[in-house]
Amino acid sequence: MAASAYARPGDSLMSLLPSPWFLGLFLLGAIAMRGAGCTYNDIVDEGIDAQVERTRSRPLPSGQVSRRQAWVFLVLQALVGLVVLLQFNSFAVLLGISSLAIVAIYPFMKRITNWPQFVLGLAFSWGALMGWAAEFGDIDGPALLLYFGSIMWVIGYDTIYAHQDKEDDALVGVKSTARFFGENTKSWLVGLYAGALMLFATAFAMAQVPMPALAGLVAAGAHMARQIATLDIDNPDQCLRLFRSNGQVGWIIFIGLICGGAWVALKPLI
């Protein structure tokens, strides 16, 4: 979105597409820091994971990996993330470092609130701010709207994920939006996904991205609607499949933005 923001006829194709260098950095950084976050989460939740059927076979609770080994792995992943972060401008570096506070508190939220998915959204959506900061060196309205929309999207798809463990979670006292929404999950998903799409569309409009990018949002909305229509909250295998399918939603939105930038650059040649 940042790359194609404020596009004008006559802009070159390369100026309206994301920098391959930035894309590579964000890919590597996302893998490293998501991995670090998962490792940290597994360290904190070792005792809980041992009591949940689906997670008791994970490396830590099953004894395949020691806590010391997990901490070493966490540090190595964080160092990779730091090296990547230092390739950006100083504002983006400070912004990236500030996200660590949210990552640090997230694993404890399921013990004290029915909305741990909200805190997960705060952490997982940080890339919306980072992408804009890397491109412009600041944070503007479109980035904030994209961030807030992503938070709603994360709450939605992670609620689907959390329905896998709701029975075990109830036994061990773990809170989640899946347990909180219960039989009203589909109604909540309608609101969350619709809110996310509206915020995404408003962000696109504010950033003046090319109109064809909206086609990606329409297609993403259709995908989200199918998730809600087919969801069976009492079918763990299906919940996992629908959760994973949100990767396709991200790709659809991304491709829509790419096509929008290309459309503006190539339109004079058509």
Image (spheres, rainbow, N blue to C red):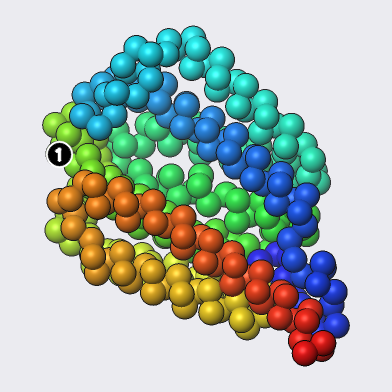
Residue visible at 77% across and 57% down? 19
Residue 259: x, y in percent? Answer: 65, 74
x then y, percent, for residue 179: 20, 47
Q: What crowding class fits label 1: few (fewer than 14 Cα within 10 Å), some (14-19), or many (20 or more)?
A: some
24 vs 256: above or below: above
Up-down: is 13 above or below 269?
above
Instruction: Please indicate whether residue 123 sits to the left or right of residue 25 in the image.
Output: left
Q: Secondary structure at mark 1?
A: helix
Pick out the residue farthest to the front.
270
* Residue 145 can be seen, yes or no: no
Please name whichever residue, 57 or 155, is drawn nearer the observer in this view of the structure: 57
Q: Which residue is mark 1?
A: 167
Measured along the vertical axis of the image, is residue 224 above or below residue 201?
above
Where does the image place residue 160, in percent across and percent down from the top left?
29, 52
Residue 200's spot in the image, x, y percent? Answer: 53, 70
Dividing the picture into quadrants, the one containing residue 56 is: top left
Residue at 72% of width from left, 38% of height from top?
Answer: 85
| Residue at x 60%, y 51% (from the top left corner) | 127
The quadrant of the picture occupied by the N terminus is bottom right
| Relative horizontal placement of residue 45, taking residue 33 as reference (left or right) | left
Residue 53 in sight in this render: yes
Q: What's the amino acid at mark 1?
A: Glu
Quadrant of the image containing the C terminus: bottom right
